[in-house]
Image: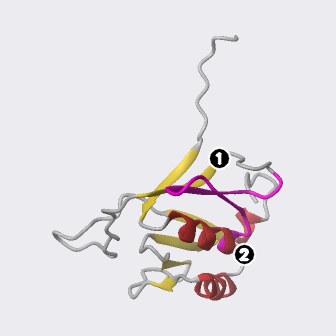
């Protein structure tokens, strides 16, 4: 079994112009640890998982980064991915995200989640999932 293939998620990587600033935002949003990785990289990881614990959210500098338009518009920069966060209190989570530097997206499509934009313009969702976040099966902090 020592030659058994293993595949594990290492990171979810976001391009941006200011990786340290974006890492600070997500660290504040989730209460995760922030680790700068030179001038062009930074990551956030769950507390108590050791410095540089994985999986993590990794931020890489891309001087040509253009924020996506959300919702999508023809011939505009499209989003390629977004992160969903389970929360136990949607209203408080939205207020916290705004205090950390996020903006509420102008258009919303559900009362069960709120689409937010991080400081670099990436969309992310705060999802009302109290039963899931409090479940013993929820993997990360």
Specify which label sits upstream in the sequence, 2 or 1: 1
The answer to whether residue 73 is above or below residue 13 is below
Q: Which mark is residue 119?
A: none
Name the residue carrying label 1.
Answer: 55
* Image location (x, y in percent) of residue 43: 61, 56
The reply to whether the C-beta atoms of the residues labelled 2 and 1 are less than 8 Å apart is no
The answer to whether residue 136 is above or below residue 20 is above
Callout 2: helix, strand or loop? loop
Q: Residue at x 26, y 67 (%)?
A: 77
Q: Residue at x 44, y 73 (%)?
A: 120
Q: CA distance from mark 2 to mark 1?
A: 22 Å
Label 1: how many residues lie within 10 Å, few (<14), some (14-19) or many (20+)?
some
* Name of the residue lying farthest toward the left: 75
> Of discs 2 and 1, which sits in the foreground?
1
* Image location (x, y in percent) of residue 83: 52, 62
Name the residue carrying label 2.
Answer: 88
The answer to whether residue 4 is above or below residue 95 is above
Q: Give the magenta range.
A: 29-48
Label 2: how many residues lie within 10 Å, few (<14), some (14-19) or many (20+)?
some
Quadrant placement of the C terminus = bottom right
* Image location (x, y in percent) of residue 55: 65, 47
* Image location (x, y in percent) of residue 94: 61, 84
The answer to whether residue 93 is above or below residue 39 is below
Q: Nearer the viewer, residue 46 or 81?
A: 46
Q: Is residue 31 magenta?
A: yes
Left of 106 or right of it: where is 64?
left
Q: Quadrant of residue 67?
A: bottom left
């Amino acid at each position: 079994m020592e030659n058994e293939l293993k595949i594990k998620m290492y990171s979810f990587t976001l391009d941006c112009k200011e990786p340290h600033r974006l890492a600070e935002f997500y660290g504040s949003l989730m209460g995760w640890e922030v680790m700068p990785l030179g001038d062009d990289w930074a990551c956030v990881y769950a507390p108590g998982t050791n410095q540089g614990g994985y999986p993590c959210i990794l931020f890489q500098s891309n001087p040509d980064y253009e924020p996506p338009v959300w919702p999508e518009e023809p011939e505009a920069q499209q989003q390629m991915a977004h992160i969903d966060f389970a929360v136990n209190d949607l209203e408080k989570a939205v207020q916290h995200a705004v205090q950390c530097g996020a903006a509420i997206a102008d258009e919303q499509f559900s009362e069960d989640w709120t689409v937010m934009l991080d400081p670099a313009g990436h969309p992310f969702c705060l999802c009302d999932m109290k039963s899931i976040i409090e479940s013993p099966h929820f993997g990360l902090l």
